[in-house]
Image (tube, coloured by chain):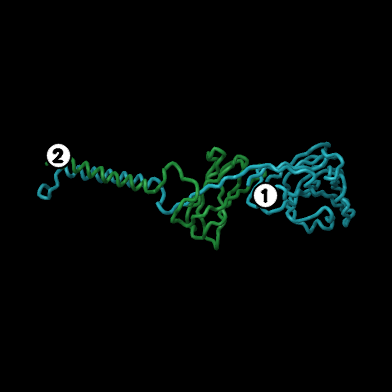
Chain colours: A green, B cyan
Amino acid sequence: MKRLTRIFGIALTAALLSVGVASAASLGLNSGGLEAGSAAVNGCTSSSLTATRNVSNSGNVTQVNVTGVPQACAGQTLAVTLENSSHTSLGASSVIVGTCTGGCTVTVAGFGTVSAANLTAYALSITQ
Amino acid sequence: MRRLGITRRRLIVAVLVATICSVGAGYAASLGLGSNQLHAWSQTLTKGTCNQTSTTADDTYVQQALPTSTAGGTATTLTISPVAGAQDYAFIRFNLSGCSLPTTAGADSAVLTVRVTTAGSDTISLFPVTSSWSSSTLTWNGVPGLTIGSTATGTFSASTTGAKTVTVTADVDAAIKAGALWGWELRATSGTAIVAIGAAENGTSGNRPSMTLSYEK
């Protein structure tokens, strides 16, 4: 009887542990980073939005402008990472999308000193 | 306790199970993401250069003493004068249409080069022009109708002859996004001398204005 109780306890523990891990895995993401591309989501948009950047006269990025953000994204967090040709982060910043009519242009600033000449890609995400 | 079937062993197992279950849930929460509220994408940029020469340049100078003259449009040098009652302003722009840049593109770096052909102890300042003009029609009287920035993009000293460079990255970046580059007004902001720079029509190619441009799109 004692042995049966022990086995039952171990089995139950293993089963519940699996549920916990499976819950994390169901997010489809590693905690180390987001995947690029247009992932299918149930969020406010599934479109690949367009980003442009402004520069200072010395050639450093002053802000990134993301156009066409749907109104449904208001209140969600738009994060932008500036990457070099090795897809290494040169700087990152985020902002809460505000309310607007139609497609919003969201301005993200605060990347630090990033030379536009080194910028070769934007990685963007919208999360709640 | 025993009457309820709760033994010490069973209690320990129950606590252990609850603890491990919490760890699993905590791991999921540590990702900081809702499972259905994410959109991620990337945008890759293309880099290039599109250097400008006299073939894409348009320039002139306007004369306070001859307020309706368009003679500067065909001159081989552009006069810049701070003399009261006889001021001269030069204008230079480049046609970037050959670069085929969309309005979502931008300048990574842009440097204007002019060559001083007649030196004088003046500081020449470049003010961005953001409205249209043509060297064949612009006159002194037409200048107030232009949209010209009140802050100088850059300056150079005209105290010696030769090439002078001014970084104009921000202006060119804004112009690409606006769809056209209307260039700069060059004006003496200190000094009393009458100086000159080579025009696009100058017989010596090295005296003509040019601009290096590195872009992304």
Instruction: Name the side, left or right, on which A27 lies relative to B177.
Output: left
Which of B46 and B195 lies nearest the eye of the viewer?
B46
Q: Identify which amino acid the numbered label 2 is placed on.
A: Arg
Mark 1 surroundings within 10 Å by alpha-carbon count, few (fewer than 14), some (14 through 19), many (20 or more): some
Q: Which residue is drawn at 63% across and 40% down?
A: A117
Q: Identify which amino acid the numbered label 1 is placed on.
A: Leu
Mark number for residue B45? none
Q: Are marks 1 and 2 on the same chain?
A: no
Residue B97 seen: yes
**For the residue labelled by badge 1, is the local secondary structure a helix, a strand or a loop?**
loop
Q: Which residue is drawn at 60% across and 46% down?
A: A62
Question: Closer to the observer: label 1 or label 2?
Answer: 1
| Residue B190 figure quarter | top right
Query: Residue under circle 2?
Result: A3
**For the residue labelled by badge 2, is the local secondary structure a helix, a strand or a loop?**
helix
Q: Residue furthest bottom?
A: A101
The spot of residue A3 in percent (x, y) is 14, 39
| Residue B148 figure quarter | bottom right
Instruction: Name the side, left or right, on which A90 lies relative to B182.
Output: left
Q: Which residue lies furthest to the right in this view?
A: B66
The spot of residue B6 in percent (x, y) is 14, 47
Judging from the image, mark 1 belongs to the subunit labelled: B
- The image quadrant where one finds the N terminus of chain A is top left
The spot of residue A25 in percent (x, y) is 37, 46
The spot of residue B90 in percent (x, y) is 82, 48
Distance between the alpha carbons at the discs numbered 1 and 2: 76 Å
Q: Residue furthest left?
A: B3
Judging from the image, mark 2 belongs to the subunit labelled: A
Query: Residue under circle 1?
Result: B101
Mark 2 surroundings within 10 Å by alpha-carbon count, few (fewer than 14), some (14 through 19), many (20 or more): few
Instruction: Name the side, left or right, on which A54 lies relative to B111.
Output: left
